[in-house]
Image (cartoon, rainbow, N blue to C red):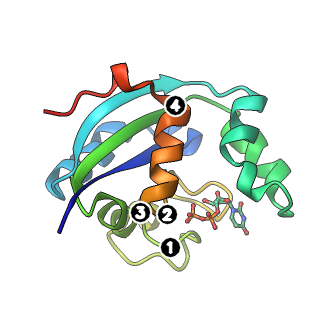
């Protein structure tokens, strides 16, 4: 067990559904602490930069378009095994395949509009956290 951080984004569909609090409650109940948070409406270049690793994928254009379609809620979560804990809470990428009780099973409509983003590893998390938050905006106690 180790204290870890992960980058989490509630995507435009989740923010539009007004379930920020409900999802934050799941984070807290799972032992994840919100140590940074801000709402943002991503520009095209911010979304493209964030998802640069997917640049060559067929869904890239639609993904960027979706992620810039409305405000998102971005947070850094800290806790034991935060990356995996958060991904377990998210559920599978395709909500149809997501386990019952996961965020995507409960709130997502489709693989394109799937409610939440979570870093997929500790190294990715460090890069993604730095993409959105300077260290002065992260408050771990
Ligand atoms: N995505 C998509 N179509 C696909 C696969 C992925 O629109 O066929 C989007 C989806 O929003 C997903 C994101 O691209 O969350 C990143 O894909 P990844 O495979 O990294 O899934 P995740 O880590 O978000 O579960």
What distance separates the C-alpha of mark 1 from that of mark 4? 24 Å
Q: Is mark 2 within 8 Å of ligand 1?
A: yes
What distance separates the C-alpha of mark 3 from that of mark 1? 7 Å
Q: Please report the residue visible at 52 percent of the width from the left and 31 percent of the height from the top.
A: 132
Q: Earlier in the sequence, mark 3 or mark 2?
A: 3
Determine contact: label 3, label 4, CB under 8 Å.
no
Q: Earlier in the sequence, mark 3 or mark 4?
A: 3
Which of the two marks, 3 or 2, is nearer to us in this view? 2
Q: Please report the residue visible at 48 percent of the width from the left and 57 percent of the height from the top.
A: 123
What distance separates the C-alpha of mark 2 from that of mark 1? 12 Å
Q: Circle 2 sits on which residue?
A: 120
Q: Secondary structure at mark 3?
A: helix
Q: Please report the residue visible at 71 percent of the width from the left and 43 percent of the height from the top.
A: 66
Determine contact: label 2, label 1, CB under 8 Å.
no
Which of the two marks, 3 or 4, is nearer to us in this view? 4
Q: Secondary structure at mark 1?
A: loop
Label annotation for residue 59: none
Residue 47 in percent (x, y) is at: 70, 37
Q: Circle 1 sits on which residue?
A: 92
Between 19 and 47, the one lying in front of the other is 47
Q: Secondary structure at mark 4?
A: helix
Label annotation for residue 132: 4
What distance separates the C-alpha of mark 3 from that of mark 2? 11 Å
Q: Circle 3 sits on which residue?
A: 90
Residue 26 in percent (x, y) is at: 24, 53
Residue 118 appears in the rendering? no
Q: Earlier in the sequence, mark 2 or mark 1?
A: 1
Between 63 and 32, the one lying in front of the other is 32
Residue 130 appears in the rendering? yes
Between 17 and 62, the one lying in front of the other is 62
Residue 120 in percent (x, y) is at: 49, 63
């Amino acid at each position: 067990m180790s204290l870890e951080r992960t980058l989490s984004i509630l995507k435009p569909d989740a923010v539009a559904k007004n379930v920020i609090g409900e999802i934050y409650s799941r984070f807290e109940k799972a032992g994840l602490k919100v140590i940074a948070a801000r709402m943002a409406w991503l520009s095209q270049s911010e979304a493209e930069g964030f998802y640069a690793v997917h640049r060559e994928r067929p869904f890239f254009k639609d993904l960027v378009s979706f992620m810039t379609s409305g405000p998102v809620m971005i947070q850094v979560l800290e806790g034991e095994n935060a990356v995996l804990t958060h991904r377990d809470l998210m559920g599978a990428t395709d909500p149809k395949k997501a386990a019952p009780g996961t965020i995507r099973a409960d709130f997502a409509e489709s693989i394109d509009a799937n409610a939440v983003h979570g870093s997929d590893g500790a190294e990715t998390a460090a890069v993604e956290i730095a993409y959105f938050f300077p260290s002065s905006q992260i408050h771990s106690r």
